[in-house]
Amino acid sequence: MAGDLQTATAYLKASRFLEAAKECRAILAKTPDQPDALHFLGLAQWQIGGDAAECAALIKRAMRLVPEQSHMHHNLAAILASSGDLEEAEKQYRHAITLNPKYAEAYFNLSGAVRFSADDPSIPGMKSLYADTTLTPMDREFICYALSKAHDDTGKYEEAFHFALEGSRFKSLSFNIEAFERAIGELRNTATRRLLKAVAGRGHTSNAPVFIVGMPRSGTTLVEQILSRHSDVYAGGELQSIGSFHRSMQAMAIKQLGYKGMDFGFWPLIPHELINSAAGGFLQFIENRAGTAPIRFTDKMPSNTLYLGLIAMMFPNARIIHVRRHPLDTCVSCFMQRFRDGQEFSYRLDWLGRYYRAYVSVMEHWRNVLPLDILEIRYEDIVADPEQGARKLISFVDLAWQPACADPSAGTRDVRTASRWQVRQPVYKSSVARWRHYQSYLSPLIEALGGMEWIDAQHSP
């Protein structure tokens, strides 16, 4: 049955990428040179973890059929940037902007793939677009964050913070910090040492999983990049699997067991056979993606910080790497980043401080009760001595040292996080103490964190 382009488009917009790919293949079976179907198939395949080179080839094929389509150049650039070809990605982003000077999203994504110089010709273009009163709220948000990044790169910190602050005001926020803090209290009361001891050893025995946790923008991508340079490690990136299992079990507890608590109190109600089944399914998912059963694999989803108790039930032999970074550097980096989705707590400085405090309390709890090995590693220590940091990480996951791990910037794996530019560069120190450039604007954040004395205590080795 022939596919339908309108249906494929709807699937893409709804992030239903498997269905979108299937629809596009049906179109191409009948019309092999349908350019939109080729373009959409490349995008959909990329979103579900397809080979970046093959996905790029599909879009290039579409571009040969219908040249000079700005959105195709933009989407090709996104795939190239994720796979590490930043030079070609920059060319494609800039060409998309040449074709469509009002392409605010292209300016924003360009800002994540380059380091701007003061004479970059795109900066006047961004300023001109910012002055356009006909911009949609979404496009104004994109251009604000792009200008913030450009001014930060060029040392104009007052302007950089101004644009980040303005960009944050365009976010439609549903996050409830009080509800989150209450849920964290429930987590601490639920995931007790007694509960975790009672279920110890009942999950899958695999020692392949390595979960990298920490706040967003704390250095988790750098840590995964170091590990990914080892031949026995498959880098999974930010996987949704643990959070999805948590949500499905919560829905089951509500529907079938009448559970009426908050987000974590149902853990003792999860049947052991479902925990084991989910663990096995997760391992099979990794094997399918990697093409083999890896000796070690990483999952660096930041929200897994909340699910370490569930992870301990599923994988009693898993390893946890907790990446710490100076609280103010972490929070400033979060605030000045437009995340693709989620992370709503990061768009208000007071929420950021309270969220960070809750995260610290969760990690303190896990250190006291979790029956798993946890390596605490500071981002600043890796930056100061990359090889020593890499050796510590490789030793913790019980693998033999390989010199390639000391050069994470040479990695070729697909990186889709906000750190996609940074991890392609040699480990650099300019991100350490970055918060000092913005200190005069951070009073709400510092107050919410508990003051400089608490902050300094958290940053101590």
Image: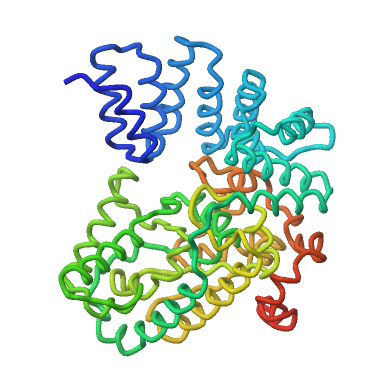
Residue 316 percent location from the top left of the image: 31, 74
Q: Residue at position x 28%, y 11% from top?
A: 31
Q: Residue furthest bottom?
A: 194
Where residue 366 appears, as percent x and y from the top left, is: 45, 80
Q: Nearer the viewer, residue 390 or 122?
A: 122
Q: Which image quarter: residue 117?
A: top right
Q: In this view, does 394 lie above or below 272?
A: above
Taking 31 as reference, is 423 above or below it? below
Residue 306 placement, left or right of 242: right
Q: Position of residue 321 (x, y in %)?
A: 49, 68
Horizontal arrangement in the rendering, residue 234 relative to residue 219 (left or right): left
Q: Is residue 166 left or right of residue 18?
A: right
- Residue 369: x and y, percent? 41, 85
Q: Quadrant of the N terminus?
A: top left
Which of the 4 image quarters holds residue 315?
bottom left
Above-or-below relation of 3 to 209: above
Residue at figure coordinates x 15%, y 70% from the top left = 256
Q: Residue at x 27, y 77 (%)?
A: 260
Q: Quadrant of the C terminus?
A: bottom right
Colour convention of the picture? rainbow
Identity of the residue drawn at 41% across and 23% down:
39
Q: Residue furthest front?
A: 133
Q: How many numbered dots are placed on residues in this image? A: 0
Examine the rendered structure and indicate whether residue 393 appears above or below residue 24. below
